[in-house]
Image (cartoon, rainbow, N blue to C red):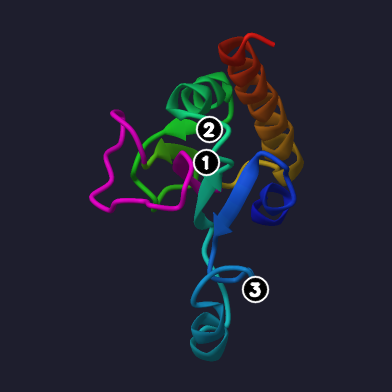
Amino acid sequence: VALWLHDRPEVRRVLHPALPSCPGHENWKRDFRGASSLFGVVFDPAFDEADMTAMIDSLTLFGIGASWGGYESLVLPTTGSISRSCASVTQGGPACRFHIGLESGDSLVADLERGLGRMAAARDRRAGA
């Protein structure tokens, strides 16, 4: 799922230490043999918090939550007024954190693809396109 998101045009950056594009990847590679299913996504700055909220609200397989130890897939905004993160993300676009659970990867990708379509539609409505 992280690799799929990495290649999406809506995504500016996937923050997952197992990805070579992530800051600190070399340290992760040196010190670890595996990775978890928790990672951050920074969206293109053409999208705003409302666009990201439209995407999150449209997801059907992801719950909203911060309990990263469970078996279910979760999403949590980490920027804007609905953020519950103590860290400030300064990556240049709206951001959220995903936890990938035990659901089918193909089903999660399909859910995210629908959600990203909703995010783009929200941006287009806002821009008057």
Q: Which residue is mark 2?
A: 62
From the viewer's side, name the closer residue of 38 and 6.
6
Please identify the residue farthest to the bottom as the structure is shown.
Answer: 30
* Residue 3, percent from left and from top: 70, 56
What is the three-letter code of the residue carrying label 1?
A: Ser
* Residue 30, percent from left and from top: 54, 90
Q: Residues within 10 Å of mark 2 (few under 14, many from 20)?
A: many
Element marked by disc 2: loop
Please identify the residue farthest to the front as the structure is shown.
Answer: 128
* Residue 2, percent from left and from top: 64, 54
From the viewer's side, name the closer residue of 88 and 2.
88
What is the three-letter code of the residue carrying label 3?
A: Pro
Residue 33 versus residue 65 in the image, above or below: below
Element marked by disc 3: loop
Element marked by disc 1: loop
Q: Which mark is residue 73?
A: 1
Residue ID at (63%, 45%): 11
Magenta stretch bounds = 79-100
For discs 3 and 2, the disc positioned in front in the rendered view: 3
Q: Which residue is mark 3?
A: 20
**The C terminus lies in quadrant:** top right
Magenta-drawn stretch, dominant element (helix, strand or loop): loop
